[in-house]
Amino acid sequence: MRGARPDKAKRQMDDTHDAAALGQAEIRDLKNTVFALREALEKVRQESGESVLQATSRANAEILQLKTTIGALRDELEASHASREEAVQQAHSADQDEIRQLKATIASLRESLEAARLDKDKGVGDALAGAQNEVSQVRAAVVKLREALERSEYAKQDALAAMRAQHQSELNQLHQTITALRGQLQGAPVRQSG
C-alpha cells in the first residue's frame, strides 16, 4: 500500500504541474492578448489623435476661411449700405429739386392763367361793350329805317291817293268827253254838267 501512494502523489504532482503549465500558458496567452490589445488601443488612440488633429486643422482652416468671408461680406454690406444711403440722398435731393421746379412751374402757370383770364375778361368786356354799341347803332338804324319806311308808306299812300284822284278826274273828264261825243254823233244837244 505504501508503493501505491507515491504513484498517486506523483500523479497529483503531475496534474498540478500540468495545471500550472496550463495556467502559465493561459497567463502567457492572456498577456499576449493584453499586449496585442494595448498595441491596438495605442494605434487607435494614435489614429484617433491624428484624425482629431486633422479634423481640428480642417475645422480651423474652415473657420478662418469663414471669418475671412464674413469680413468680406461685412465690408461689402457696409459699402452697400453706404452706397444705398448715398443713392437715397441723391434721389431725395433730385426729388426736392423736381418738386421745387414743379412748384415754380405751377406758380408760373397760375400767373399765366390769371393773366389770360384777365385778358379774356377784358376781351369779353370789350366785345360786350362793342356788341352793345353795335346793337344800339343797329337799333337806332332800325328806328330810322322804320321811320323812313313809314314816311315812305305815307308818301306812297299820298301819291296813290293823288293818283287815284287824278285818275278819277281823268275818268270823269273822259266820261264827259264820251258823253259829249255821243251827243254830237247823235245830233242831240249836249248838256254840259256844271
Image (tube, grey):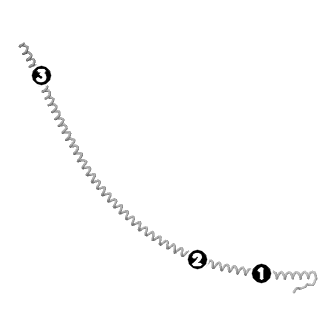
Give the label, 2 or 1, closer to the camera: 2
Q: Which residue is mark 1?
A: 161
Label 3: element kind: helix
Label 1: element kind: helix
Q: Residue furthest right?
A: 187
Q: CA distance from mark 3 to mark 1?
A: 192 Å
Q: Residue furthest bottom?
A: 194
Look at 88% across and 85% down and name the residue there: 193
Q: Which residue is mark 2?
A: 132
- In the picture, residue 6 is in which quadrant? top left
Q: CA distance from mark 3 to mark 2?
A: 156 Å
Q: CA distance from mark 2 to mark 1?
A: 42 Å
Give the label, 3 or 1, closer to the camera: 3
- Crowding around mark 2 (Cα neighbors within 10 Å: few <14, some 14 to 19, many 20+) is few
N-terminal of the pair, mark 3 or mark 1, is 3
x and y, in percent, of residue 38 in the image: 15, 33
Under mark 2, the amino acid is Gln
